[in-house]
Image (spheres, grey):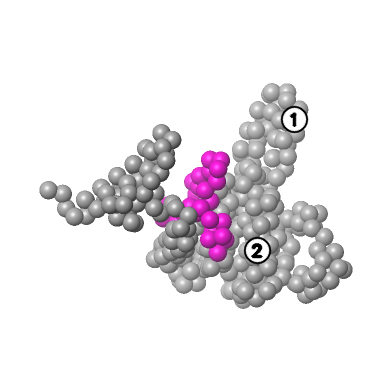
Amino acid sequence: MKSTQDLSEGRLADAWAELQSHSNQGYALHADAYRLAFADPEFLLRRETRGLRMQLEMLKPESEQHAQGIENTIVVFGSARFPSPEAAQESLAAAQASGDTQALAQAERHLRNSRYYDQARLFSRLVAGYSKARPAKEQLHICTGGGPGIMEAANRGAHELGMLNVGLNIALPHEQSANPYVSPSLNFKFHYFAMRKMHFMMRAKALVAFPGGFGTLDELFEVITLVQTRKAKPVPIVLFGSSYWKRLFNFEVLIEEGAISPEDLDLLTYVDDPQDAWEAIRSFYELTP
């Protein structure tokens, strides 16, 4: 006879398997009145239980990170579309062989932007190298959105030095999975952007934003707003790639129009070198070399 634990596990597994089967066959999902509430996925996916799902997305990553000693993070944002130099070179070779001018232009752009991948990787190695020699409570762990591109580069740098690193991935309509360098036990997936962004800030001791698109901008301005309004403690906000950021935004216009105060721009630090990014954080907290 199976143990109580085995029976419980079977019920949970059966519940999710039944949901998947119904979904695959296009059947409507109806809650089972007799099934235990926490083992009833149809019930948990109802509109009325959204608050519970949000609570779970808060609790699961929080408890797992706390259990593994992840208390201080350096959050790295940046484009998911900037490949590694190796991948960019392969794409360029393929484009050159194809004779497709559009593909060639795109491959050349990817190669140009791949330098940011290397720089994010090197920055992460600096953080990991510092932390590896420190007691657990003083360690700084790299945290990213867990995806490809700049996120992969940052996770990769920490992984290469044997340091735990965090990935906060998001479920999207198009297929997305975590990059292979996120520590498996710290590889989380979210449904709600709001909960994901909250987790970014809960342990963040600094933000380093590499060039990126809408997602990067959304996350960046969320942090700037939280710090500016003092809803979050002051942290270094480092914009890596000064020419990119200054070409993208003319923040002086906000001052000229009275939309922000001149001192608000002191929240931002522009850098173009991984060492300078690390020094900005190290000097902010007066960390010993």
Report the magenta residues as a range.
170-198
- Which secondary structure lies at badge 1? helix
Distance between the alpha carbons at the discs numbered 1 and 2: 35 Å
- Residue in the picture at 70% in, 60% down: 239
Q: Residue at x 71, y 27 (%)?
A: 96
Q: What residue is disc 2 on?
A: 222
Q: Position of residue 97 (x, y in %)?
A: 68, 24
Tell whether label 2 touches label 1 (CB within 8 Å).
Answer: no
Q: Which mark is residue 102?
A: 1
| Crowding at mark 1 (Cα within 10 Å: few <14, some 14-19, many 20+) | few
Q: Is residue 117 visible to the viewer in this orientation of the structure?
A: no
Residue 195 visible in the snapshot: yes
Between 92 and 176, the one nearer to me in the picture: 176
Amino acid of disc 2: Glu
> In the rendering, which numbered label is found on residue 11?
none
Q: Is residue 180 magenta?
A: yes
**Residue 90 location, x and y as percent?**
63, 33
Q: Position of residue 224 (x, y in %)?
A: 68, 67
Q: Nearer the viewer, residue 91 or 10?
A: 10
Residue in view at x 70 percent, y 45 percent: 113
> Is the C terminus in the top left, top right, bottom left or bottom right quadrant?
bottom right
